[in-house]
Image (spheres, grey):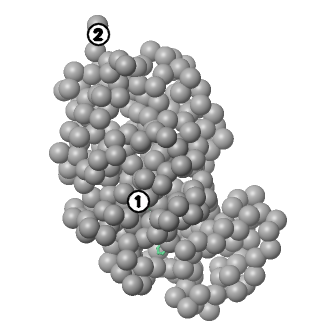
């Protein structure tokens, strides 16, 4: 029997900017797997020649969602895909936060507004300011925060997204992201490592799609409360498969309690470059998923 063949799935942007990509391929090869990086949208890829396709840096998926979900379904029909297509579908629209909140997970308080649904200026008038963002997004695209009193600007932003047929999210601005947003990484349900990063929406009132997605990354040792909240988010996913990889992004609310900002199950940056133990855990989880069963 030959070595298990693994596609580490990326994109043009991933080939250029994903620092983890070559490390992952190298670690898998060192573990005896035949691994190669492949762009999800590379034409003519015969996905059935792989035992496993593991999604990593398909960073353009949010802008090409229909195409990407169709790719995930087709690829899941040709080989083993992780995370599986149903998880990818569910996780591609942040309305999943409402599912998790409904199951008792502490989530950033979120009002979802659908195209065609009325929304009042009052929805955008919160004492600490608001964040407006689309339900399908990554890398803080089309996202901005508004200072208290700027509700007319916030409403205009929402209307622009709604006019494009997109679901809008309105959240209170959590000021404690200035102390850092946490990202806790799990492999096959087990906690691996965590990082902290700086705030993204430093300038109020502007949509800046050229922002650095992860400013000022440093290693982070999660508190018990953070681990509890992260585990409750993973445990509340309304699908049977345990994700092969997951990143749980937490912010602190005004009371200092961790709340879920995002559960990333599609193509999260896993910050493996400075986490060699994490890289090894990931490689082991992939090898296990690629083994015949
Ligand atoms: N409610 C909020 N309060 C404070 N900062 C926020 C809030 N929502 C988003 N942000 C900032 O914007 C960034 C991107 O938002 P996020 O919800 O993580 O969407 P994306 O999928 O684009 O990463 C976050 O990492 C955080 O820095
Ligand atoms: Mg995020």
Q: Is mark 1 within 8 Å of ligand 1?
A: no
The residue singled out by tag 1 in the image is 232
- Within 10 Å of the Cα at label 1, are there few (<14), some (14-19), or many (20+) other Cα atoms? some
Mark 2 to mark 1: distance in Å? 39 Å
The residue lying toward the viewer, choosing from 57 and 111, is 111
Q: Identify the secondary structure beneath mark 2.
A: loop
Answer whether residue 144 is visible to the viewer in this image. yes
The residue singled out by tag 2 in the image is 2
Specify whether 161 is left or right of 56: right
Find residue 218 and report its horizontal and vertical position in percent.
Answer: 24, 64
Q: Residue at x 48, y 55 (%)?
A: 236
Residue lying furthest front: 103
Q: Which mark is residue 224?
A: none
Q: Residue at x 43, y 28 (%)?
A: 53
217 w.r.t. 175: above or below: above
Find residue 99 and report its horizontal and vertical position in percent.
Answer: 58, 58
Q: Identify the secondary structure beneath mark 1.
A: helix
17 w.r.t. 142: above or below: above
Q: Residue at x 76, y 76 (%)?
A: 119
| Quarter where residue 86 is shown | top right
The residue lying toward the viewer, choosing from 280 and 61, is 280
Answer whether residue 183 is visible to the viewer in this image. no
- Within 10 Å of the Cα at label 2, are there few (<14), some (14-19), or many (20+) other Cα atoms? few
Q: Residue at x 44, y 15 (%)?
A: 49
């Amino acid at each position: 029997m030959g070595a298990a063949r693994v596609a580490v799935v990326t994109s043009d942007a991933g080939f250029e900017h994903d620092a983890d990509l070559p490390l992952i391929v190298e670690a898998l090869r060192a573990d005896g797997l035949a691994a190669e990086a492949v762009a999800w949208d590379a034409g003519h890829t015969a996905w059935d020649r792989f035992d496993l396709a593991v999604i990593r840096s398909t960073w353009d998926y949010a802008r090409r969602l229909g195409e990407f979900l169709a790719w995930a379904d087709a690829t899941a029909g040709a080989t083993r895909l992780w995370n599986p297509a149903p998880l990818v579908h569910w996780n591609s629209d942040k309305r999943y936060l409402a599912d998790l909140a409904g199951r008792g997970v502490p989530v950033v308080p979120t009002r979802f507004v659908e195209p065609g649904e009325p929304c009042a200026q009052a929805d955008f008038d919160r004492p600490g300011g608001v964040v407006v963002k689309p339900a399908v997004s990554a890398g803080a695209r089309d996202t901005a925060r508004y200072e208290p009193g700027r509700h007319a600007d916030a409403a205009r932003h929402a209307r622009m997204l709604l006019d494009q047929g997109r679901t809008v999210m309105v959240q209170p601005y959590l000021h404690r992201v200035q102390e850092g947003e946490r990202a806790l990484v799990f492999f096959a349900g087990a906690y691996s490592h965590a990082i902290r990063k700086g705030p993204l929406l430093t300038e109020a009132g502007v949509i800046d799609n050229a922002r650095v997605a992860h400013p000022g990354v440093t290693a982070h040792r999660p508190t018990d409360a953070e681990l509890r909240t992260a585990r409750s988010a993973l445990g509340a996913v309304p699908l049977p498969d345990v994700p092969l990889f997951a990143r749980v992004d937490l912010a602190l609310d005004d009371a200092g309690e961790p709340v879920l900002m995002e559960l990333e199950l599609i193509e999260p940056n896993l910050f493996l470059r400075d986490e060699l133990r994490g890289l090894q855990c990931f490689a082991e989880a992939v090898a296990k998923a690629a083994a015949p069963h």
